[in-house]
Image (cartoon, rainbow, N blue to C red):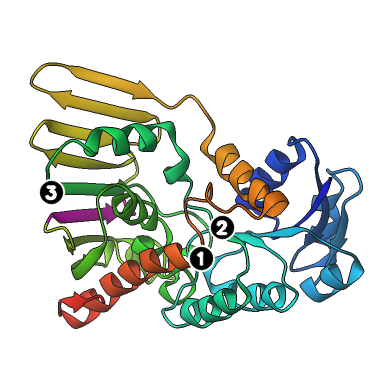
Amino acid sequence: MTLQVGIIGTGWFADKHAHLLSQQEGVKVTAIAASSQQKADQFASTFNDAKGYSNIEDMLDAGKLDAVYICTPPFAHGHFEQALIERNIPFLVEKPLSSEAELPMQLLQKIEAKQLITSVGYHFRYMDSADKAKQLLADRNIAMSLGYWMGGAPGGTWWRRQELSGGQFVEQTTHIVDLLRYLVGEVTEVYATYSEGILAKQDSNANVADAGTVTLKLSNGTIATISNTCIIPAGYESGLHVYTDAGKLEIGHGGLKDITTASTTEYHNQSNPYENEAKAFLHAIRTGDVSLIRSNYADAYRTHQVTMAANESASTGKVIKLG
Protein backbone atom coordinates (compact mmCIF):
# COMPACT_ATOMS: atom_id res chain seq x y z
CA MET A 1 0.00 0.00 0.00
CA THR A 2 1.46 3.35 -1.09
CA LEU A 3 0.54 6.18 1.26
CA GLN A 4 -0.19 9.55 -0.32
CA VAL A 5 0.89 12.40 1.94
CA GLY A 6 0.25 16.14 1.70
CA ILE A 7 2.40 18.91 3.18
CA ILE A 8 1.12 22.27 4.40
CA GLY A 9 3.93 24.82 4.39
CA THR A 10 7.15 25.34 2.45
CA GLY A 11 9.64 26.32 5.15
CA TRP A 12 12.57 24.48 6.71
CA PHE A 13 10.49 21.91 8.57
CA ALA A 14 8.24 21.28 5.57
CA ASP A 15 11.29 20.64 3.42
CA LYS A 16 12.88 18.34 6.01
CA HIS A 17 9.74 16.26 6.48
CA ALA A 18 8.90 16.11 2.78
CA HIS A 19 12.32 14.85 1.74
CA LEU A 20 12.41 12.35 4.60
CA LEU A 21 8.98 11.03 3.61
CA SER A 22 10.02 10.74 -0.04
CA GLN A 23 12.81 8.39 1.05
CA GLN A 24 10.43 6.01 2.84
CA GLU A 25 9.28 2.88 1.04
CA GLY A 26 5.63 2.96 0.06
CA VAL A 27 5.20 6.72 0.61
CA LYS A 28 4.63 9.50 -1.91
CA VAL A 29 4.45 13.23 -1.30
CA THR A 30 1.66 14.12 -3.71
CA ALA A 31 0.34 17.53 -2.61
CA ILE A 32 1.77 20.80 -1.29
CA ALA A 33 -0.33 23.65 0.11
CA ALA A 34 1.26 27.07 0.57
CA SER A 35 0.34 30.72 1.06
CA SER A 36 0.70 31.32 -2.69
CA GLN A 37 0.44 29.21 -5.82
CA GLN A 38 3.98 30.17 -6.79
CA LYS A 39 5.43 28.90 -3.51
CA ALA A 40 3.39 25.71 -3.71
CA ASP A 41 4.38 24.97 -7.31
CA GLN A 42 8.05 25.66 -6.67
CA PHE A 43 8.11 23.34 -3.65
CA ALA A 44 6.09 20.63 -5.42
CA SER A 45 8.44 20.65 -8.41
CA THR A 46 11.12 18.88 -6.36
CA PHE A 47 8.95 15.79 -5.94
CA ASN A 48 7.66 13.42 -8.61
CA ASP A 49 3.87 13.44 -8.95
CA ALA A 50 3.42 16.28 -6.44
CA LYS A 51 1.05 19.16 -7.19
CA GLY A 52 0.88 22.58 -5.58
CA TYR A 53 -2.19 24.31 -4.18
CA SER A 54 -2.75 27.82 -2.86
CA ASN A 55 -5.26 26.69 -0.24
CA ILE A 56 -5.93 23.53 1.74
CA GLU A 57 -9.52 23.08 0.57
CA ASP A 58 -8.41 22.71 -3.05
CA MET A 59 -5.69 20.29 -1.98
CA LEU A 60 -8.09 18.10 0.00
CA ASP A 61 -10.81 18.20 -2.63
CA ALA A 62 -8.41 17.19 -5.41
CA GLY A 63 -7.95 13.60 -4.28
CA LYS A 64 -7.53 11.19 -1.42
CA LEU A 65 -4.70 11.84 1.00
CA ASP A 66 -3.81 9.26 3.64
CA ALA A 67 -2.10 11.81 5.88
CA VAL A 68 -1.03 15.45 6.03
CA TYR A 69 1.93 17.18 7.70
CA ILE A 70 1.21 20.67 9.06
CA CYS A 71 4.44 22.70 9.05
CA THR A 72 3.33 26.28 9.63
CA PRO A 73 4.19 29.02 12.16
CA PRO A 74 2.29 28.90 15.47
CA PHE A 75 -0.10 31.73 14.63
CA ALA A 76 -1.31 29.92 11.48
CA HIS A 77 -2.70 26.88 13.30
CA GLY A 78 -6.40 26.15 13.60
CA HIS A 79 -7.97 26.24 10.16
CA PHE A 80 -5.75 23.48 8.76
CA GLU A 81 -6.34 21.12 11.68
CA GLN A 82 -10.08 21.77 11.54
CA ALA A 83 -10.25 20.92 7.82
CA LEU A 84 -8.39 17.65 8.39
CA ILE A 85 -10.50 16.69 11.39
CA GLU A 86 -13.69 17.23 9.38
CA ARG A 87 -12.37 14.88 6.67
CA ASN A 88 -10.98 12.29 9.12
CA ILE A 89 -7.45 12.66 7.72
CA PRO A 90 -4.62 11.79 10.15
CA PHE A 91 -2.05 14.53 10.59
CA LEU A 92 1.36 15.26 12.06
CA VAL A 93 1.68 18.84 13.24
CA GLU A 94 4.91 20.59 14.12
CA LYS A 95 5.27 22.13 17.56
CA PRO A 96 4.09 24.33 19.15
CA LEU A 97 0.37 23.66 18.79
CA SER A 98 -0.46 27.37 18.72
CA SER A 99 0.72 30.79 19.85
CA GLU A 100 -2.29 31.10 22.16
CA ALA A 101 -3.88 29.07 24.93
CA GLU A 102 -7.46 28.15 24.02
CA LEU A 103 -7.36 26.88 20.43
CA PRO A 104 -5.56 23.54 21.09
CA MET A 105 -8.18 22.45 23.63
CA GLN A 106 -10.97 23.15 21.14
CA LEU A 107 -9.18 21.11 18.49
CA LEU A 108 -8.34 18.32 20.95
CA GLN A 109 -12.00 17.81 21.82
CA LYS A 110 -12.82 17.34 18.13
CA ILE A 111 -9.82 15.04 17.57
CA GLU A 112 -10.83 12.81 20.46
CA ALA A 113 -14.46 12.71 19.32
CA LYS A 114 -13.29 11.38 15.94
CA GLN A 115 -10.55 9.18 17.48
CA LEU A 116 -8.28 10.61 14.81
CA ILE A 117 -4.64 9.50 14.55
CA THR A 118 -2.33 12.43 15.30
CA SER A 119 1.34 13.02 15.99
CA VAL A 120 3.19 16.14 17.13
CA GLY A 121 6.78 16.99 16.22
CA TYR A 122 8.48 16.58 19.58
CA HIS A 123 11.37 14.71 18.01
CA PHE A 124 13.55 14.75 21.16
CA ARG A 125 11.37 11.87 22.41
CA TYR A 126 12.58 9.75 19.48
CA MET A 127 16.30 10.19 20.19
CA ASP A 128 18.33 7.13 21.21
CA SER A 129 19.50 9.16 24.19
CA ALA A 130 15.92 9.60 25.39
CA ASP A 131 15.47 5.82 25.34
CA LYS A 132 18.68 5.33 27.31
CA ALA A 133 17.80 8.05 29.79
CA LYS A 134 14.43 6.44 30.46
CA GLN A 135 16.17 3.13 31.10
CA LEU A 136 18.70 4.64 33.52
CA LEU A 137 16.17 6.79 35.39
CA ALA A 138 13.94 3.81 36.09
CA ASP A 139 16.39 2.70 38.79
CA ARG A 140 17.32 6.10 40.22
CA ASN A 141 15.72 8.62 42.54
CA ILE A 142 15.37 12.04 40.95
CA ALA A 143 15.83 15.19 43.03
CA MET A 144 15.69 17.95 40.40
CA SER A 145 16.14 18.82 36.75
CA LEU A 146 17.73 21.77 34.99
CA GLY A 147 16.81 22.59 31.40
CA TYR A 148 18.10 25.30 29.10
CA TRP A 149 17.80 26.70 25.55
CA MET A 150 20.37 29.41 24.94
CA GLY A 151 20.73 30.99 21.52
CA GLY A 152 19.88 33.86 19.23
CA ALA A 153 16.56 34.99 17.81
CA PRO A 154 15.73 33.59 14.35
CA GLY A 155 15.43 36.21 11.64
CA GLY A 156 11.79 35.60 10.73
CA THR A 157 9.53 38.54 11.56
CA TRP A 158 6.80 36.35 13.05
CA TRP A 159 9.17 34.65 15.53
CA ARG A 160 10.06 37.96 17.16
CA ARG A 161 6.41 38.92 17.74
CA GLN A 162 4.88 37.57 20.96
CA GLU A 163 1.38 37.35 19.52
CA LEU A 164 2.59 35.34 16.51
CA SER A 165 5.13 32.93 18.03
CA GLY A 166 4.17 32.89 21.71
CA GLY A 167 7.75 33.83 22.55
CA GLN A 168 10.85 31.68 22.95
CA PHE A 169 9.56 29.51 25.80
CA VAL A 170 6.53 28.52 23.72
CA GLU A 171 8.20 28.24 20.32
CA GLN A 172 11.64 26.78 21.11
CA THR A 173 12.03 25.82 24.73
CA THR A 174 8.83 23.77 24.48
CA HIS A 175 11.15 20.92 23.39
CA ILE A 176 12.86 20.97 26.79
CA VAL A 177 9.55 21.16 28.64
CA ASP A 178 8.31 18.18 26.66
CA LEU A 179 11.50 16.20 27.29
CA LEU A 180 11.15 16.91 31.02
CA ARG A 181 7.59 15.60 30.96
CA TYR A 182 8.62 12.54 28.98
CA LEU A 183 11.56 11.57 31.18
CA VAL A 184 10.72 12.91 34.63
CA GLY A 185 7.00 13.53 35.15
CA GLU A 186 3.99 15.81 34.86
CA VAL A 187 4.11 19.47 35.89
CA THR A 188 1.66 20.74 38.50
CA GLU A 189 2.87 24.29 39.26
CA VAL A 190 4.62 26.95 37.20
CA TYR A 191 6.31 30.20 38.22
CA ALA A 192 8.15 32.31 35.64
CA THR A 193 10.08 35.55 35.36
CA TYR A 194 11.14 37.10 32.03
CA SER A 195 13.44 39.99 31.12
CA GLU A 196 13.25 42.17 28.02
CA GLY A 197 14.69 45.22 26.30
CA ILE A 198 17.86 44.08 24.53
CA LEU A 199 16.33 42.47 21.44
CA ALA A 200 13.79 45.30 21.14
CA LYS A 201 16.66 47.79 20.92
CA GLN A 202 18.27 45.74 18.13
CA ASP A 203 15.00 45.20 16.24
CA SER A 204 12.11 47.65 16.56
CA ASN A 205 9.73 44.92 15.37
CA ALA A 206 10.59 42.57 18.26
CA ASN A 207 8.48 42.34 21.41
CA VAL A 208 9.39 38.87 22.76
CA ALA A 209 11.31 38.50 26.00
CA ASP A 210 15.12 38.38 25.90
CA ALA A 211 15.37 35.71 28.57
CA GLY A 212 13.36 33.80 31.11
CA THR A 213 13.62 31.42 34.02
CA VAL A 214 10.75 29.07 34.85
CA THR A 215 10.47 27.08 38.08
CA LEU A 216 8.34 23.93 37.92
CA LYS A 217 6.91 21.58 40.53
CA LEU A 218 6.17 18.04 39.36
CA SER A 219 3.53 15.59 40.53
CA ASN A 220 6.19 13.15 41.79
CA GLY A 221 7.57 15.74 44.21
CA THR A 222 10.64 16.71 42.20
CA ILE A 223 11.40 20.24 41.05
CA ALA A 224 12.85 21.71 37.86
CA THR A 225 14.11 24.96 36.44
CA ILE A 226 14.18 25.71 32.73
CA SER A 227 15.86 28.87 31.45
CA ASN A 228 16.25 30.37 28.00
CA THR A 229 17.57 33.37 26.15
CA CYS A 230 17.42 34.48 22.52
CA ILE A 231 19.95 37.33 22.52
CA ILE A 232 23.40 35.68 22.61
CA PRO A 233 25.49 35.85 19.41
CA ALA A 234 27.62 32.81 20.34
CA GLY A 235 27.70 29.92 22.78
CA TYR A 236 24.44 28.30 21.71
CA GLU A 237 23.35 25.27 23.74
CA SER A 238 20.22 23.38 24.70
CA GLY A 239 19.49 20.32 26.79
CA LEU A 240 18.21 18.84 30.02
CA HIS A 241 20.21 17.79 33.09
CA VAL A 242 18.61 15.40 35.56
CA TYR A 243 20.15 15.12 39.05
CA THR A 244 19.67 11.81 40.86
CA ASP A 245 21.03 9.83 43.80
CA ALA A 246 23.39 8.12 41.33
CA GLY A 247 24.75 11.30 39.76
CA LYS A 248 23.80 13.43 36.76
CA LEU A 249 22.36 12.74 33.32
CA GLU A 250 22.96 15.31 30.57
CA ILE A 251 20.66 14.90 27.56
CA GLY A 252 21.15 16.98 24.40
CA HIS A 253 20.85 16.90 20.63
CA GLY A 254 23.92 14.73 20.22
CA GLY A 255 23.31 12.15 22.91
CA LEU A 256 23.54 11.43 26.62
CA LYS A 257 26.25 11.75 29.25
CA ASP A 258 25.86 9.64 32.40
CA ILE A 259 28.04 10.98 35.22
CA THR A 260 28.36 8.82 38.35
CA THR A 261 31.01 8.27 41.03
CA ALA A 262 32.18 5.18 39.14
CA SER A 263 32.53 6.65 35.66
CA THR A 264 31.37 9.09 33.01
CA THR A 265 29.77 7.29 30.08
CA GLU A 266 28.62 8.89 26.84
CA TYR A 267 25.92 7.49 24.57
CA HIS A 268 25.70 9.03 21.11
CA ASN A 269 22.52 9.16 19.06
CA GLN A 270 22.84 6.71 16.18
CA SER A 271 19.43 6.92 14.53
CA ASN A 272 17.64 9.94 13.05
CA PRO A 273 14.87 11.00 15.48
CA TYR A 274 12.90 12.65 12.67
CA GLU A 275 12.91 9.37 10.75
CA ASN A 276 11.90 7.44 13.87
CA GLU A 277 9.05 9.89 14.35
CA ALA A 278 7.91 9.52 10.73
CA LYS A 279 8.03 5.73 10.84
CA ALA A 280 5.91 5.63 13.99
CA PHE A 281 3.28 7.87 12.39
CA LEU A 282 3.24 5.98 9.09
CA HIS A 283 2.98 2.66 10.93
CA ALA A 284 -0.07 3.98 12.79
CA ILE A 285 -1.75 5.03 9.54
CA ARG A 286 -1.14 1.66 7.91
CA THR A 287 -2.11 -0.52 10.87
CA GLY A 288 -4.14 1.56 13.30
CA ASP A 289 -1.53 0.75 15.97
CA VAL A 290 -0.65 4.08 17.62
CA SER A 291 1.61 2.61 20.32
CA LEU A 292 4.82 3.79 18.60
CA ILE A 293 3.71 7.43 18.50
CA ARG A 294 5.39 9.10 21.49
CA SER A 295 3.52 12.41 21.34
CA ASN A 296 -0.02 12.62 20.05
CA TYR A 297 -2.12 15.78 20.15
CA ALA A 298 -3.50 15.05 23.63
CA ASP A 299 -0.03 14.55 25.10
CA ALA A 300 1.39 17.59 23.31
CA TYR A 301 -1.46 19.67 24.71
CA ARG A 302 -0.14 19.04 28.22
CA THR A 303 3.23 20.46 27.17
CA HIS A 304 1.42 23.42 25.63
CA GLN A 305 -0.39 24.05 28.93
CA VAL A 306 2.96 24.29 30.73
CA THR A 307 4.44 26.80 28.27
CA MET A 308 1.26 28.90 28.29
CA ALA A 309 1.27 28.83 32.10
CA ALA A 310 4.84 30.16 32.04
CA ASN A 311 3.76 33.13 29.90
CA GLU A 312 0.80 33.76 32.20
CA SER A 313 2.96 33.59 35.30
CA ALA A 314 5.55 35.95 33.83
CA SER A 315 2.88 38.52 33.01
CA THR A 316 0.96 38.27 36.30
CA GLY A 317 3.69 37.42 38.80
CA LYS A 318 1.57 34.54 40.10
CA VAL A 319 2.17 30.83 40.52
CA ILE A 320 -0.02 28.98 38.01
CA LYS A 321 -1.41 25.62 39.11
CA LEU A 322 -2.19 22.97 36.51
CA GLY A 323 -4.84 20.30 36.96
Q: Secondary structure at mark 1?
A: helix
Of the numbered discs in the image, which one, if any, rests on residue 297? Answer: 1
- Report the residue marked by disc 3: 144
Mark 3, Cα crowd under 10 Å, few <14 / some 14-19 / many 20+, is some
Give the Cα distance between marks 1 and 2. 6 Å
What residue type is disc 2 on? Ser
Q: Is residue 299 visible?
A: yes
Q: Give whichever of discs 3 and 2 has the lower sequence position.
A: 2
Residue 81 picture quarter: bottom right
Q: Give whichever of discs 1 and 3 has the lower sequence position.
A: 3
Which residues lie in the magenta part? Answer: 222-231
What residue type is disc 3 on? Met
Q: Tell me, yes or no, whether the two marked residues, 1 and 3, touch with CB atoms within 8 Å.
A: no
Assign the magenta stretch its main secondary structure.
strand
Q: Where is residue 128 shown, x and y percent of the image?
A: 43, 32
Of the numbered discs in the image, which one, if any, rests on residue 119? Answer: 2
Q: Where is residue 196 shown, x and y percent of the image?
A: 26, 67
Q: Is residue 167 visible?
A: no
